Image: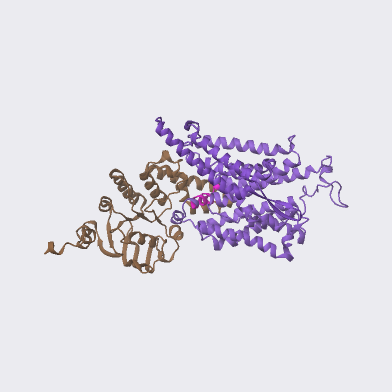
Amino acid sequence: MNGVLLDVANLTMRFGGLTAIDDLSFSAQAGHITAIIGPNGAGKTTVFNCITGFYKPTLGRIALARDSATFDLAQMSGHKIASAAHVARTFQNIRLFPRMTVLENLIVAQHNKLMCASGYTIAGLFGLPSYRKAERNAVAKARGWLERIGLVDRADDEAGTLHYGAQRKLEIARALCTDPVLLCLDEPAAGLNARESAELNRLLLDIRATDGVSLLLIEHDMNVVMGISDHIVVLDYGKRIANGTPDAVRADPAVIRAYLGEPDAVESA
Amino acid sequence: MSRVTTSRGANHMAVAALKDAGLAGFVALMLAVPLVGFRTIEVGSGLGLQTRFDWVAYCVIAVIAGRLILNFWPPHWRIRRRAKAPHVSNAQHRTTMKLVALGGIGFAVALPFLPFADRYVIDLAITILIYVMLGWGLNIVVGLAGLLDLGYVAFYAVGAYSFALGSRYWGLNFWEALPMAGALAAMLGVLLGFPVLRLRGDYLAIVTLGFGEMIRLLIINLQSFTGGPNGVSGIPRPSFFGFPFAREAEAGGPMPFHELFGLDYSTQHRFIFLYFIILALALITNAFTQRIRRMPIGRAWEALREDEIACKALGINPTNTKLTAFTIGAMFGGFAGAFFATRQGFISPESFNFLESAFILAIVVLGGMGSQIGIVIATILLVALPEVGREFAEFRMLLFGAAMIAIMVWRPYGLLSRRSPTIQLGSGA
């Protein structure tokens, strides 16, 4: 897999008088892990919300190239982006279905496939064998993911009863059950301890290697960002201030300025 | 908890308890003076006012005394809410629920043949079953999909009127009108749902409330077609597959039910038959809901109730999914409405006011949103309690209110709030 998977061009998002994203362009390669970093309020989550259809961008184009088809995500509604363009996402504040079981969370993620298999419910109501088979496959797939994130023994517990780290992993597994080509992770390591975030790194690398899913992530945890990213885009006040490999970005004076502030004039003199 | 043993501490507690009781007494006084203290009586040709301040005094004394008893009640006697319900596994829970359900269905089928089942009991049972069915129908919308619908009675009204008017203008009988009532109610559900289901929470509740009133006003004002406030009377009774429940056969008509089975004529046959119709309708509603909960669409409803944004991110179309829930709920409301019309023989817009919607919603909420058996228990409580309380005459609504408060205090999530999973690992489909 090679070439540009996601191409964001001249993306601008205004909320009234506030320009959250200002003429942003970047691209994410297929099979890469691309990170978006920046200080608080730089507009990272807004970029995500534009890509995944939760916001309609004011200006700009977001093109996703998949299987020789190109989708303009800026013109599609949120659920279509997930179901047709196969872009999945997780949320900064975890959004599981807390009163449903872990397994049900993963089955709901396969809704569209199962919906077709159930003949839009009508065939399913009569319990046709084709639907039963589809449901078995869905359970098998969910089980596979539960094994990978180590939650098989919690499968029938309510998702809300899992501890924080497990909920994060479950949310990632749920997003992957939609068979995405691009998975957008909004601060997946937030609130995880060192051991858990190392585990997360391994999981993300494994997802890219085994499932061929490209990743786009927002992250503050530099161990995660520098450890696994192929490419980093740095935002500040809605503008791109740097773009490159982790090493190049780390050495970029503009990035250091954005994170640590301007050196004092007297001191620098 | 350590007990206060010093006399100072005890004094302090006594003062606090007295203060508390005094305050409660004051509130009781303020409420009792207008509610109990005055009474209108007929004096000659007009109305006169009678004061009953002795009653007010009794009320206040009762409240103060009750409050004092409550305050000095030894703490270990108090009902303590368990921090956590005892752990019952899903499998155990499911077996218990299955047994309860089977027992309930067995009892329901046997009821008309039990010795105490006179006309009054069967009539009450029919009323209960109508509300159970409405509760189960609304449960799809409120309990599963989490859409607060305050105008559910509109679909009930449409079902009732489509049969009443269908029989008046086109001579439809109950069995012909039943599917039509469901279809019309469902269609109305789609029509309302399309523009409205983009709204969320409180906004949706307000719009559905308005819609319920609109349908009622429409029925009142389309007088030439619906009969307006006078209602529609002479709605035909259902027949037993074409055999009427009558003493004598009509000239040239089929023989009556009792002759068909060689029974003696009894007016009770018709009621028992009505009872079984609504029992069957309710059980169909239940079976359908149980089954659809395990379909992708049912899971999507519950997911939507939990988190709409997450649903969107998983590629679930929220509008379509809500619309199906709304429509299916409406359809069952329509079926129940058609049954209501044939049972009453007369319907008027008065039967479909907002209180009815609120009552059905109360059943769903008290039962524990989403719980089928909880709804049955809540209906029995809410319908039967006012009946039992008839002896208390004017105080029965007070009892009713107290019972509702008690349920909400002890079981804030409804009578049965446990949700059984729609699929389990290992059990497969």
Looking at this view, name the residue that lies furthest to the left. A269
From this view, report whether residue B265 is shown above or below residue A56: above
In the rendered structure, the colour chosen for chain A is: brown
The answer, for residue B424, to whether it is visible in the render is: no
Give coordinates of residue B82: x percent, y percent. Answer: 48, 36
Residue placed most toward the observer, B290 or B270: B270
x 73%, y 57%: residue: B164
Query: What chain is the purple one?
Result: B
Q: Which segment did they paint magenta?
A: B293-304
The verdict on residue B49 being magenta is: no
Look at the picture and state if A18 lies above or below B335. below
Left or right? Give the position of A105 relative to B355. left
In this rendering, the count of numbered labels is 0
Q: Who's the residue at 58% across and 58% down the image?
A: B209
Colour scheme of this structure image? by chain
**Which secondary structure is most common in the magenta stretch?**
helix
Task: Tell me: B187 left or right of B236.
Answer: left
In this view of the protein, which residue sits in the foreground, B374 or A219? Answer: B374
Answer whether residue A260 is visible to the viewer in this image: yes
Provide residue B222's location: percent of width, then percent of height. 70, 65
Image quadrant holding the N terminus of chain B, namely: top left
B99 horizontally vs B5: left or right: right
Q: Quadrant of residue B11?
A: top left
Q: Percent position (x, y) of residue B24?
A: 52, 43
Name the residue rendered at 69%, 58% in the picture.
B349
Q: Nearer the viewer, residue A47 or B107?
A: B107
Q: Residue furthest top?
A: B5
